[in-house]
Image: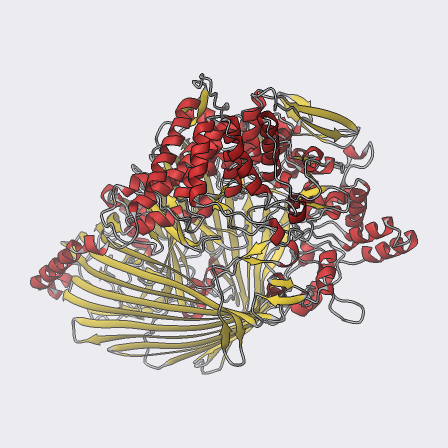
Amino acid sequence: MRQYIYKLLIASLFFMASCNKFLEDKTNKTSTVPSTLEDMQALLDAGNELNLGSYPFFLEACTDDFLLTDAGYNNLDVFDKQVYTFQNPDLYSATEKLILWRDAYKAIAIANTVLDGLSDIKILKGLDPNNIKGQALFHRAFMHFILLQIYAAPFDEKGNNNVPGIPLKLSSDINDKTKRSTVGECYRSVIQDLEEAAGLLPNELGIVTRPNKISAHAALSRVYMAMEDYGNAKKYAELVLTRYDKLMDLNAMSVDASFPYPAMNAETLFFAYSNGTTMFGGSRGSYMADDLLSMYDTHDLRFRANYKKGTDGRYTFKGHYVGSGTYLFFVGLTTSEVLLNAAESNTRLGNTTLAKQQLNELLQNRIEKQFFVPVTESNSEALLKTIIGERRKELVRRGLRWSDLRRLNKDERFKKQIVRAVTIDGKTEQFKLLPNSSGYIFNIPAEVKNMTGME
Amino acid sequence: MKSLISLILMMVCCKAVFAQGKYRGNVIDQDHNPIAFATFKLEGTAPAYRTDSLGRFEFSSSNAIRFVTFSAMGFETKSINWDTNVTNRTILLNRKENRLDEVQVNTGYQSIPKDRATGSFGVVSNKDFNTIPSRGILDRIEGKVSGLQFDRRSGKSVLNIRGINTFSELAAQPLIVVDNFPYDGTLDDLNPNDVESVSVLKDAAASSIWGSRAGNGVIVVTTKKGKAGNKPIINFTTTTMVSRKPDLFYNKTINSRDFIEVERFLFDNKYYDDAYNSAYNQTTIFSPVVDMLYANKAGRLSDIDLNTRLKALEGHDYRNDLMKYVYQAAINQQYFLDISTSNATNRNRYSVGYDRGTGDTKGANNDRLTLRATNSWKLGQKLSIENMISLINGRDRVFSSTPRYPMIPGGGKNNLYPYASLVDDEGNFLSIPRFYNSSFLEKANADGLLDWTYRPLADRDKSTYKSWNRHLYLNFNLHYDILPFLKADLIYGYEHSNTKSESLSGEDSFEVRDLINKYTRIVNGAKLYDFPFGAIMRNADNEMQSHRGRVQVSLNKSFGDEHVLNALIGTELYTRNADQRSSGSYGYNAEVLSRKSMDYNAIYQLYGGLGYGFMTPLDSYAGTLSRTVSMYFNGLYEYKGKYGLSFSARKDAANSFGTNINSQWNPLWSAGLSWQIAKEKFMCGADWIDYFKLRTTFGYGGVQPSGALNKTVIGYVGNAKYSNLPYAIIGSPPNPGLKWETVRTLNFGLDFSIYGGKLTANLDYYRKKSFDLLSDDPFDPTSGYSLLTKNVGQIATHGIDLTLASNGRFGNGYWQSSINFSYSKNKVTDYRGTIGATSMYLDGGQTLMPLLGKSLYPVFSYKSAGLDPVNGDPRGYKNGDISKDYQALTMDSLQYLNYHGTALPPIYGAWNNTIGYGKFYLDFSLLFKFGHYFKKKSIVYGSLFDSWDGHADFAKRWQQPGDELVTTVPSMQYPNDSYRDLFYQHSSNNIVKGDLIRLQNIRLGYNFGLSDSKIKGQLYIGANNVGLIWRKNKENLDPDYLDLPAPRVISIGGNINF
């Protein structure tokens, strides 16, 4: 009988020895430890975690483009009310706004996961690792840049950039200490990432939800505009335009349609948007400011394309480059923006002829054909005013007005005070956002400061 | 070897006896298992004797004995006319029909007599299991075992054994085992008529043989096997159960008149103006009243007409229409036949069950066929084989487009305006708004689109959902007696289940019409349909296969007179593979089975400014694979049949992937002691005590964690918007250094039985501590993650389980009664995680929400200072002063809030009774729950204004000074302050005590039998979920349910066997 026991015991031992292999297979078949280039690309294709929604809505919340009716204001939660009235709230969690911060940094965390994970990948086949690295660098830089527009002082091209910027996240280690870098360091990092990305990314546009070399140059142009480095802004803008300069001709489009611009249209170099918030919704009492609407010429097709009049006379915005939407707004890069970057930079650099040529190229696609008159302004001061005016008319809800306000407020000629009035219980109260004031720098969530000990 | 056994005999209660005649024997049950510690008495002598742990006895007598009476708990007493010439005989005792206590407990690894165990077990006997007729198994054990709690607040039965040991609800479930192995199929698909009994393994010694899955306790379902007997036994059972229609009026919602009043109030405050006048209001819906008010304002509707029409609406409540046209009483019929046959070497049982039923909405029906065969063969002296095959075939059908209450019309609304009519006086089905407002639909109609109106009752049968499931279960057990005391078992189990479903949305269903219309483009006056006509077919196919193998060696040996060792050691392998496949087609034509192709990459312009859209592919794949390897040991040593020592240990390894967690895994163990006091010499005089035992155990169980990994894990979740590329998200960031959770339990128990089982009691006191509990914890969101799993805490639990059972006879009658009383209190003793925002702790205890020093499921509220006598504002306290700064109040730190207690009843139990007289019997059970709190619903003005979700408390709101003396409901205000809502909703005014007593079931039955007694049976009529007979709250709420309470079920049935 004893041999039976031994046999059983021996059988069991074999059985245990083979266990390691038996236990190696993964539990969830749709999950994996990222180990291939396809896995990395799949992480970067998760639009709703990266470029489709994650940019904080603050980027458009305090501009001079729109206002709210009193009922619209009353419908907002307390946090949004404070944002709308330039009160600069810092308690995010009570109204569940902390996810805005989390979602923005989630995009950066994904990019960092890819960047850190690429070095571990043994099987390099199918996809180009350089392309993937370039995409990740681009996403990281682009989100860092957007956050800089919200949470940090504008870049001071005259010198002192040792003021607090944003926490730069350059590693996927979740225990990496969160601390604020200076504005100077932050912009340097953004430029470095974008330049490296431009060297790695493919030359063609491809699917515009993915970054490419053209969009990396367009992003550099945008960053340098914000830094008032017009030489570089021009350089990168023109690098874009030599490769790709398609525009949509509004004359050939049904501008009265509910949403005239399709998603991923011909002008889009990089498709990205913010989920926005209810304060941008027409049915939530949002309407466009008169001073913006009055800028458009009668024959400017952008007016019909961008705005629709409600039965109460208010104009709501419909010119989303996202193709549709009520609360969301476009943040991506387009040829029209690049043309305006080039035109403005050229004017500031004294190349007015080139600037006019670039401006007219845009405008002939925007103004009714039979009424189009090219801009011939020879005074560079007047031309700059025209271009900046066109910039405002063109780039509504495209994630740029806030940066432009911050940049132009430093210039006596263009500085602007924004006023919003709210009537509560019959009492009208006015709120002002003064140029170059601290209202242009949003508060980092107090909860994050508490958790990290950051200033 | 046999000689060895026969030599070991033992006298339990020794008296000096004269060695004139020496008699010996053994006592066995019908299954030839020895009955340990049976009592026997010699006629005319005072002392009682007992058999030993192997059922053997010996006595001497100087007198000429005539009668010897044998008795044992759960068995019929037998008197033997002792023939003094026979010195060795075997006594067979029959099990009692109505025994109060099941002797055997099944741990899934072995079946042991309950009175020999050191651990804490609860057993639901077959009789108790059958007192509540139901389609499923778990419903039948509520209230039958102390320490087992049913939490039905979510609408499903969530079980816990002796409280919650973990911070994650998913990980808090007890392990459910059927016969030998954890069950992978749907437990409620098993036919309850195939179940013999249910064992509940409560403390560490009872459950730790299940190792890493034992931390929450184990429920073992034992199925019926063939019975011993010479003739075939045939049993037929049938039951019909009728459930009442769901009571839609249970939820107290705002009435139509009040709702209209609110709409007029908002209209006067220009609340709707922005949306009504907006150029982009296609998907904002307005109620008919608001439309009328605007028509009136524009002069299109006169004041008189308006008032008449509003007056007419006041009387409507759409729930009446739903009750009449949608809901029905659900009927379930069960038929069940089983046959068992046996002979000396072979035992078989075959059963067939057929159930069919209707759902609670019209057109819903289901049926189930269960087949089961168990056979056991003895092949020679040493080898026996037992096998089981079970097949379940189920079918379900429901109209998936049936409207249910509450109706959610979309367009930003969570409920429908109450005055909606779904049907007019002529019986025509009416439309209600859905997704789009009426002016948008008018335009679509003018453009010649398909009918875009939504008529819920007409749409009711336009879409159907059907599912079929098939479950196969095989179990094969090879049993070999290596030596008389050494046995080996080889067990293999196989489960295969396949569930298929098809969901067909008809071409004329609202769902399809809506899609066709949305994807219609009007180009130069012509309509282009981007979405194909035809139905939408969605298929799902879920398949699961699992294999389990076990090799086990068990020893059962006596050493000398006084030592008995029972031990088993084994190893186990488990693998389970599950695949989910779904597919589907658009433009499906059921006549010719054709379908249309789609372009999933295209971006389509939608009709009427609804934006752009994509077609969603209907196919997707997913799957899981679980594997476990385990080794275990369990031993019980007995000394003199009085002292027991048990030890058990287990080690598991699993393919929790990407982890090295296996290497961190410590073996889990438990140990226990028992002492049968009644067998001590000093107790000899007290022969009224049948049984008296003390026991104590100590040990560890584990809780399987959910997703804690030390590498980044990504999951492929579908195809991305706009690009249609497959994409992956980070499922969990790398998180090394995590430990698995363990639960340590210390248990003291006492069991006794007196006067031949007239009164029995089981009392347990336990202390538990759960360590290294994993919790998703707030984390620096700059990392990209706002929550991170960490080992953040400990929970200490202590409690009492008490079962008292009495069994009285009087004349022709009897009364069996048992009380199960459980007390379980837990406290979080360590919580290093960050505490979330105050508002997260105010859901009235619906979530576990660990917090240092508090119980799980804590109930908090803002201290109310009553209503402001001036304007009916709610008031609270800030720094001790009355305050109306709602924003500050609602963000107040948790320490300033009221902590009421827990929402999970710390005291609960049941009183079960059977009263019989002659051939009649009456069963009833009362359930009780005490000491918990819940939050009642009340008016939230913001939800009423924005999403039509209103509470009847609106009628009790403060309206004029003085009302604050009689009501706590704040006044209505415009504009609404969401913090004011938040404060009132979560204020102490709305926290209510949950204490209740429920009549769970009652049943009247009649036992019949023909004169020759060969044919026996019973007939009964009864009711379940009868209702509350007492509750602490004054609002007539049933605290066991957050939503509608389970409907009352009337059942009628019977069985016959011969």
Give left or right: position of A283 versus B260: left
Q: Which quarter of the rendering shows the C terminus of chain B?
A: bottom left
Q: Position of residue B613 (x, y in %)?
A: 55, 56
Query: Quadrant of the rendered structure where residue A372 is?
Result: top right
Give left or right: position of B874 versus B641: right
Residue closer to the observer: B627 or B410: B410
Query: Quadrant of the rendered structure where residue B549 is?
Result: bottom left
Q: Position of residue A84 (x, y in %)?
A: 64, 31
Residue closer to the observer: B604 or A198: A198
Q: Is residue B118 visible?
A: no
Q: Position of residue A232 (x, y in %)?
A: 43, 30
Q: Which quarter of the rendering shows the N terminus of chain B?
A: bottom left
Residue beneath the point at 45% across and 16% down: A160
Residue beneath the point at 45% across and 44% down: A49
On screen, A51 above or below A88?
below
Q: Residue furthest left?
A: A3
Residue beneath the point at 74% across and 56% down: B439
Q: Position of residue B65 (x, y in %)?
A: 27, 66
User: Number of marks in the image?
Assistant: 0
Give left or right: position of B332 versus B646: right
